[in-house]
Amino acid sequence: MDTDFWKDFFDCFLNSWLPGIVTFALGILYSSIVEKRKLRQKLKNDLLEIFIPVFNSGNKITFEIAENTYKKMNGTFNTYQRIYPGIFKREAEKRLSELLTEGFIIKGNINKKFFEPDDIEKLIKAL
């Protein structure tokens, strides 16, 4: 009788409870992965919304507008790095961080990398 009870108990557990528990755990894992991807995409879009209208518009811009955009983008990126550490891909994060650390102005001249907005846009998209 004892062996029948345990056999029925394990049979019931394996056929009823275990699939539900595993499905629940996988659902939570999948949800966290999807939420992290959505957050990363939102952060990249925020950076692109700051960068593209000024540097990729094809219009002439003033020095002050470009410098303010650089400061805003630098501040936003640094804030995202502090609030969400490890959310971005490391290599792209490192390269963008180096670019923003170099600054918009180097020894009185505009940083040459900012004359190639397509490269910076690709770098932001690679985050």
Image: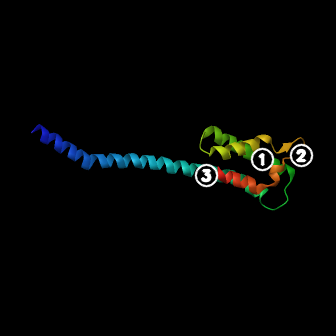
Q: Mark 2 or mark 1: name the one nearer the start of the chain.
A: 1
Check disc 1 and give the amino acid type: Tyr
Determine the residue positioned at 73% across, 47% down.
73
Whole-percent x and y of residue 77? 69, 44
10 Å crowding of disc 2: few (<14), some (14-19), many (20+): few
Is 14 left or right of 82, judged from the image as shown?
left
Q: Nearer the viewer, mark 2 or mark 1?
A: 2
**Residue 7: percent from the left, percent from the top?**
17, 43
Q: Which residue is mark 1?
A: 70
Q: How many marks?
A: 3
Callout 3: few (<14), some (14-19), or many (20+) C-alpha neighbours within 10 Å?
few
Badge 2 marks a residue whose secondary structure is strand
Figure colour scheme: rainbow
Query: Looking at the picture, how far across and down is residue 108, in whole percent?
Result: 90, 43
- The amino acid on which the numbered mark 3 sits, given as a three-letter code, is Lys
Q: Which secondary structure lies at badge 3?
A: helix
* Foreground: disc 2 or disc 3: 2
Q: Quadrant of the N terminus?
A: top left
Q: Position of residue 81 (x, y in %)?
A: 65, 40
Q: Residue at x 59, y 49 (%)?
A: 40
Q: Which residue is mark 2?
A: 109
Dots 2 and 3: beta carbons under 8 Å? Answer: no
Of pointers 3 and 1, the one earlier in the residue sequence: 3
Please tell me which residue lies in front, 73 or 102. 102
Q: CA distance from mark 3 to mark 1?
A: 19 Å
Which residue does the numbered mark 3 point to in the structure image? 42
- The quarter holding residue 3 reads top left
Q: Determine whether the residue tagged by mark 1 lies in a helix, strand or loop.
A: helix
Asked whether disc 2 touches disc 1, contact meaning CB atoms under 8 Å apart, the reply is: no
Which residue lies at the image location 57% right of the left edge and 49% below the top edge? 39
Visible in this render: residue 11? yes
